[in-house]
């Protein structure tokens, strides 16, 4: 247990150490760094995150993070609205956009099915995806979830929910290593995985054989 000469420093360290991957030693270094910066710079730092928390919304169409009710991708008339790429979270949207290989729209699930973590289908944005497909305007659903057990479980669940609709269901090619999340894949590999996607029925048949 660290002993601090200032209660304010202790409180600041406690707040920073609540962030993922930040231990108390790193938190202390960050606090001391900020103390050395000009007051105006620290105030701007604080105000940036205050505005972020107040003004960021979730797109009503795809659940992507946005400053508007409908995000820039969904409102872009040049995007193909008949093609939906299903991803786990905003980090995957950013990763795929960086490849410049995809011109459809997205659907952000907000996670993957993980019974160990207490996350079930009801905790994800599944029903809004089913509603989109039921309107008959969607031609293809691309499953772009990480090559993990949780990702595969989620894809299989979504496949069962959507297979009776008149929509082509595909999955990104396994250029992404098994066990990897999309955000850690390099842009070339991820781009090829999107372009070389395969019908999802093929993996199912391979599993049975």
Image: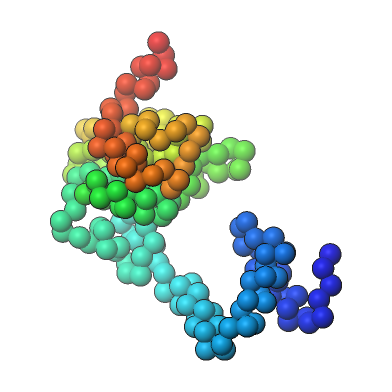
Q: Quadrant of the C terminus?
A: top left
Count the labels in the image: 0
Residue with the most extreme top position? 209
Where 192 falls versus 56 (above or below)? above
Horizontal arrangement in the rendering, residue 171 relative to residue 39 (left or right): left
As rendered, which of 9 and 108 lies closer to the eye?
Answer: 9
- Say which residue appears at 60% left-offset and 43% top-offset: 118
State whether residue 48 appears in this view. Answer: yes
Where 169 falls versus 96 (above or below)? above
Q: Position of residue 66 (x, y in %)?
A: 36, 65
State whether residue 54 appears in this view. Answer: no
- Say which residue appears at 47% left-offset and 31% top-offset: 178
Where 160 falls versus 69 (above or below)? above
As rendered, which of 42 and 197 lies closer to the eye?
Answer: 42
Q: Position of residue 200 (x, y in %)?
A: 32, 27
As rendered, which of 98 and 73 lies closer to the eye?
Answer: 98
- Say which residue appears at 58% left-offset and 83% top-offset: 37
Horizontal arrangement in the rendering, residue 58 relative to residue 165 (left or right): right
The quadrant holding residue 142 is top left
- Say which residue appears at 35% left-offset and 70% top-offset: 67
Q: Position of residue 65 (x, y in %)?
A: 39, 61
As rendered, which of 79 and 193 lies closer to the eye?
Answer: 193
Query: Colour mode?
Result: rainbow
Q: Position of residue 45 (x, y in %)?
A: 52, 79
Where 99 falls versus 75 (above or below)? above
Q: Quadrant of the N terminus?
A: bottom right
Residue with the most extreme bottom position? 39
């Amino acid at each position: 247990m660290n002993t601090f000469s200032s209660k304010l420093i202790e409180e600041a360290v406690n707040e920073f150490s609540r962030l993922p991957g930040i231990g108390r030693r790193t938190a202390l270094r960050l606090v001391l760094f900020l103390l050395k910066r000009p007051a105006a710079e620290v105030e701007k730092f604080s105000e940036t995150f205050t505005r972020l928390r107040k003004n960021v919304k979730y797109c009503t169409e795809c659940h992507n993070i946005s400053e508007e009710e409908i995000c820039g991708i969904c409102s872009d008339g040049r995007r193909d609205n008949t093609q939906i790429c299903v991803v786990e979270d905003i980090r995957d949207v950013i990763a795929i956009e960086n490849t410049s290989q995809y011109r459809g729209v997205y659907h952000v699930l907000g996670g993957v099915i993980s019974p160990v973590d207490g996350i079930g289908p009801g905790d994800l944005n599944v029903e809004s995806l089913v509603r989109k497909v039921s309107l008959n305007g969607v031609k293809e659903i691309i499953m772009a979830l990480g090559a993990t057990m949780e990702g595969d479980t989620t894809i299989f669940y979504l496949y069962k929910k959507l297979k009776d609709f008149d929509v082509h269901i595909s999955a990104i090619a396994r250029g992404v290593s098994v066990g990897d999340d999309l955000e850690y894949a390099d842009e070339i590999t991820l781009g090829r995985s999107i372009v070389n996607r395969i019908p999802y029925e093929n993996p199912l048949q391979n599993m049975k054989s």
